[in-house]
Amino acid sequence: MNKREIAITFALSSIALSTQAYADFLSESKATLGMKNFYFNNDNRDGTAAPSKTEEWAQGFMLDYKSGYTDGTIGFGVDALGLLGVTLDSGQGRHVGSTMIPSDSDNSAVDEWSRLGLTGKVKMSKTELRYGTLIPKLPILVANDGRLLPQAFEGGQITSSEFKDLTLTGGRIEHATGRGSSDQTGLAVTGGTRESNQFDFAGGDWKVTKDLTAQYYYANLENYYTQQFFGLIHTINFLDNQSLKTDLRYFKTDSSGENSSGTKGYRVSGYTKNGDGEIDNRTWSAALIYTLGGHAITAGYQSVSDGSNFTQLNQGSLVDKGAGGASLYLYTDRLIQSFTRAGERTAFGQYAYDFAALGVPGLKASVIYLSGDNIKTTTGNNQKEWERDISLDYVLQSGTFKGVGFGWRNGKSNSEAARDQDQNRVLVSYSIPLL
């Protein structure tokens, strides 16, 4: 029996200790069925590498069950996450390079794929321990949800709010399941072909005042890197529905273990200062967000040092082709590019509007433009790139189809460090409460 099975068995046996505890466990349980219809089109505009276009359409189902806790000083519970993807269209020549639908043995798109995740949980006072399937949203690890089914991780995480205005988090991740896969893999970085099974992390969010939050996190991916994150978020609220938010972020990432010794399978890909694949990066960013009624204007700047690209978990270089895909806690992590290449300096601006201010609740739109320069790659030392993204969302507010959401994403990227691309995503989503 593995660690996950032991944890789940322990939780289930504890639940059965008393009828009252079991009743509390059920009465506080919640279950929802989420449905997502997703069309994805990524058109590579130049270059000789295949494919010229990836175009696919699929339907996803997500059954999310969250139990309550047994009664008593220590409460036990179990969560379950069932995921199913069904291919609706992925014609010949349009699946190659897919990041959404797994490939069959002949490299065509599979008809359907599924996953099941179980999580045992224990709660005492304001501290919770979870072991099993995790979908973290932390500065040092953000699960990617940019395709039909979300990326997931396996491991343990403890979160504590015992101290006023302070939330502490720590844990260990051991495996990942990619957004376009049903199979678990070990952990790696872009370019890393050898798996690590130990990603340790710890940190916290401290609400210094009602307007100021300070963050610190530490992470270590065995044989690849150590990373420290420092963050400050400050918000000033003015009269007449106005506010100004300042968001400062700094990442310090250094090589660790085999990556430091230059072992080939543990090297990061892309430019490194000495050409040895060793991780050495400092990335900082500053963003100002001014809000007035339904309007929100963001202006920011990001700087990446030139030792190597910015690095976090990414399993895309492993054998499982569906294991790739990662989200980053950076404003520059967009539809197509992430603007995290060695030496890159990026200025960005975004305008967003919530049409509820005009009496149309549920309708939101935004446009962002990013421009990066001073990029260092293995083929050049001062390359440039830019991206423009448009986002439009609407959720029905009443009637038979109340809660149905519609979304459109359009991105255009021109880059001297990568292929020029146009991308469109169209999604329809709906969630049904079952419990």
Image (cartoon, rainbow, N blue to C red):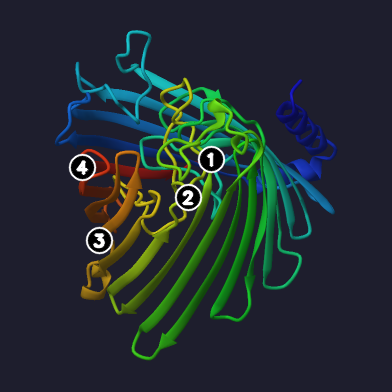
Tag of residue 278: 1
> Of discs 3 and 2, which sits in the foreground?
2
Dot 2: what SS?
Answer: loop
Amino acid found under the numbered disc labelled 3: Ile
- The residues tagged by marks 4 and 2 sit, at their Cα atoms, a distance apart of 33 Å
**Residue where numbered disc 3 is placed:** 368
**Residue visible at 54% across and 26% down in the picture:** 265
Q: Which tag, 2 or 1, sits closer to the chain's start? A: 1
N-term mark: 4 or 1? 1
All told, the count of numbered labels is 4
Q: Is 168 placed left or right of 82 in the picture?
A: right
Q: Nearer the viewer, mark 3 or mark 1?
A: 1
Residue 106, label in figure = none
Tell which of 272 and 215 is nearer to you: 272
Alpha-carbon span between mark 4 and mark 1: 35 Å
Residue 26 sits in quarter? top right
Query: Which numbered circle lies on residue 307?
Result: 2
Residue at 54% across, 33% down: 188
Q: Is residue 125 above or below residue 222?
A: below
Q: Left or right? Give the position of 352 relative to 69.
A: left
Q: Is residue 50 above or below residue 339?
A: above
Q: In the rendered structure, which amino acid carries the disc numbered 1?
A: Glu
For marks 3 and 2, the one nearer the N-term is 2
Tell me the kind of residue under disc 4: Asn
Left or right placement of residue 286 versus residue 267 in this view:
left
Q: CA distance from mark 3 to mark 4?
A: 15 Å
Q: Which mark is residue 424?
A: 4
x%, y% of residue 114? 46, 24
